[in-house]
Structures are given as C-alpha cells and as structure tokens.
C-alpha cells in the first residue's frame, strides 16, 4: 500500500514496481516455508545465524561510509 502511495506521489519509478513484482513470489515462498522450517531448526542456532547476518549487513555500510570520510 505504501509503495502505491509513493508511486502516486512520484517518489518511486517503474523499476521499483517491476522489482517488487519480481521479488514478491520469493517473499511469499519464505512466509510459507517458515512454518515447517521453524519446527525443524534449532532456535538458538537460528537466532545466532540471524544476528550474525544482521551485524554483517549493518557493518558493510558503516565501513563504506568510514572509508568515504577517510578519502
């Protein structure tokens, strides 16, 4: 809904809508698979892996910004 509002305001282009349509099936598949996988995966290991990925994902832009300031 917010993507439609942003599109109506001219804040996003057609490429954003195209990518949304392209990625939507993957998001739906993730939601459908999460239930069965939750019962099979260890919660502690899953939480640790999720936190490690989140930290790594957040560190990338921080390092990039620090390099840009140093240059």
Image (tube, rainbow, N blue to C red):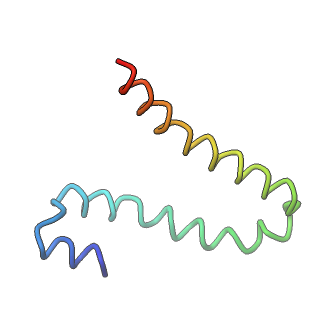
Quadrant containing the C terminus is top left
Q: Residue at x 77, y 71 (%)?
A: 36
The vertical placement of 69 against 56, above or below, is: above
Q: Quadrant of residue 30?
A: bottom right
Counting from the top left corner in percent of width and height, residue 33 is at 67, 68
Q: In the shown orientation, is residue 7 left or right of residue 40?
A: left
Residue at left offset 21%, top offset 79%: 5
* Residue situated in front as seen by the camera: 16 or 48: 48
Q: Where residue 38 appears, x then y in whole percent? A: 79, 69
**Which residue is situated farthest in the bottom direction here?**
1
Report x, y in % for residue 50: 70, 53
Determine the residue positioned at 41% across, 59% down: 23
> Which residue does the image show at 77% across and 66% down from the upper left?
37
The picture quadrant where one finds residue 19 is: bottom left
Residue at the outermost front position: 70
The number of callouts visible is 0
Quarter of the picture holding the N terminus: bottom left
- The residue sitting at the top extreme is 71
Compared across the picture, whether 31 is left or right of 23 comes to: right
Left or right of 14, for residue 30? right
Q: Is residue 54 above or below residue 59?
A: below
Residue in front for this viewpoint, 32 or 59: 59
- In the figure, 17 relative to 60: above or below? below
Residue 7 position, x and y percent, is 17, 71
Against 36, residue 71 (above or below) is: above
Side of 61 where 20 appears, left or right:
left
């Amino acid at each position: 809904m917010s993507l439609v509002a942003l599109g109506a305001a001219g804040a996003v282009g057609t490429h954003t809508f195209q990518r949304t349509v392209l990625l939507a099936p993957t998001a739906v598949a993730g939601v459908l698979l999460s239930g069965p996988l939750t019962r099979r995966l260890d919660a502690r290991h899953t939480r640790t892996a999720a936190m490690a990925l989140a930290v790594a994902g957040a560190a990338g832009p921080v390092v990039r910004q620090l390099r840009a300031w140093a240059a």
